[in-house]
Amino acid sequence: MSIGIIGAGGVARYAHLPAYRALGLDVGALCDLDAGVLRQVGADYDVPITTRDPLELITHDAVSVIDLATPPGSHLELMEMAAKHRKPVLVQKPLCFTRQDFAGIRKLKDTGARVRMNLSGRHVSAWMKVAQLIKSEEFGRPLLCTFSNRDWWDRQPGRWDHGIDQYIVFEMVIHHLDLCLFWFGPPRRLTARTGSHPRQRLQRANFATVTLEYESGLIVQIIDDWTMNEYAFAAGHPFEDVIITGENGVIRASSERVEWSPLNDNNIAVWHRPRPGQRLTSEELSFNWFPDSFGQSMRCFMEDLSKERKMREDWRHLVDLTELTFLVAESAASDEWVSFRPCPY
């Protein structure tokens, strides 16, 4: 199977393409509106087909799977185009940032469109290890989870990012909402608050606090702060700090290290991802967030394309995560708690 990437700059350039190359995944075509970017990236990765026309890429016989890495405002049109020509799509987050586009994308399910929303954090070894620990009898019932992500994140004028009022919700909070779905399942209700830094060019929401409540009593607190201009204090993506308190102990993790401390036990189990050339005496983690998980995500999608059960799971995940993201943005605007109802698919 050969991959066709629409949107050759940005994350495709520094994450998708190197990760695909490392795994031996074939990229047969690239599309980008910027001729200079298209020419340079195509040459850097020896991609045989380059075009500025998305329809040409989608309909090309050499392309089996579409990797959609364009800004979210273009997703509905491109996904409709791919659905018409029966090409499966791995679409980057955020899926969209308007309810109107979300409704249009949801209609594609009835056409039999094969779509997966690419939240590559699910393929990070550390986050998979956390899922394993949470589900173990040894950990017990989760009680409290906190995410802390702090960095300085600004955007040049004229970029698509400036068109999203609750920018950090759709760009960063969505990752942590997805990890909550991965580890704990759907929450019962949530509330959020957001704000922006007056000295940043991107005058949209650039910090957020989100609280999720679960039927089990679990509370999740997410702090995403992209106004942290002091490097010494920063712990930004993809190195956010996560602490999960369970009945029988505590997990502390980043995307490259997991620690497990059982209750009333001074011993700590540690799992690391080694640095290049480094050997560790403890159990090692294999895949980081950038760029490894992007390759794992695409490879998993390609392996799952023949499975109807996975098609239903993909649509349910796409709808649940996008709905949660909209609810966070709406709660931040209204200062109210909102309930969440999982997708019925």
Image (cartoon, rainbow, N blue to C red):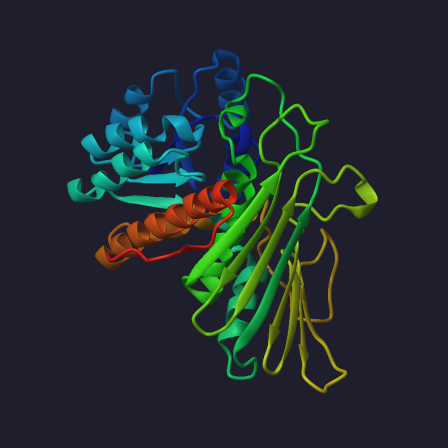
Left or right for 148, reference 345: right
Percent coordinates x, y for residue 221 in the rendering = 59, 59
Residue 172 drawn above or below residue 60 = below
Q: Nearer the viewer, residue 68 or 138?
A: 138
Snapshot quadrant of residue 291: top right
Asked if one can make out residue 23 in the rendered structure from this viewpoint, the answer is no
Marker count (numbered): 0
Asked if one can make out residue 260 in the rendered structure from this viewpoint, the answer is yes
Snapshot quadrant of residue 48: top left
Give the residue furthest to the left: 111
Q: Which residue appears at 50% of the width and 32% of the height? A: 12
Left or right for 2, reference 121: left
Q: Nearer the viewer, residue 145 or 273?
A: 145
Q: Quadrant of the N terminus?
A: top left
Snapshot quadrant of residue 147: bottom right
Residue 153 drawn above or below residue 294 = above
Percent coordinates x, y for residue 158 in the rendering = 55, 16
Percent coordinates x, y for residue 29 in the rendering = 38, 26
Residue 251 drawn above or below residue 66 = below
Q: Which residue appears at 69% of the width and 33% of the height? A: 197
Q: Quadrant of the C terminus?
A: bottom left
Percent coordinates x, y for residue 49 in the rendering = 38, 22
Q: Which residue appears at 49% of the width and 22% of the height? A: 42
Give the residue furthest to the top: 35
Left or right for 37, reference 76: right
Q: Which residue appears at 58% of the width and 49% of the height? A: 289
Left or right for 330, reference 85: right
Q: Nearer the viewer, residue 277 or 90?
A: 90
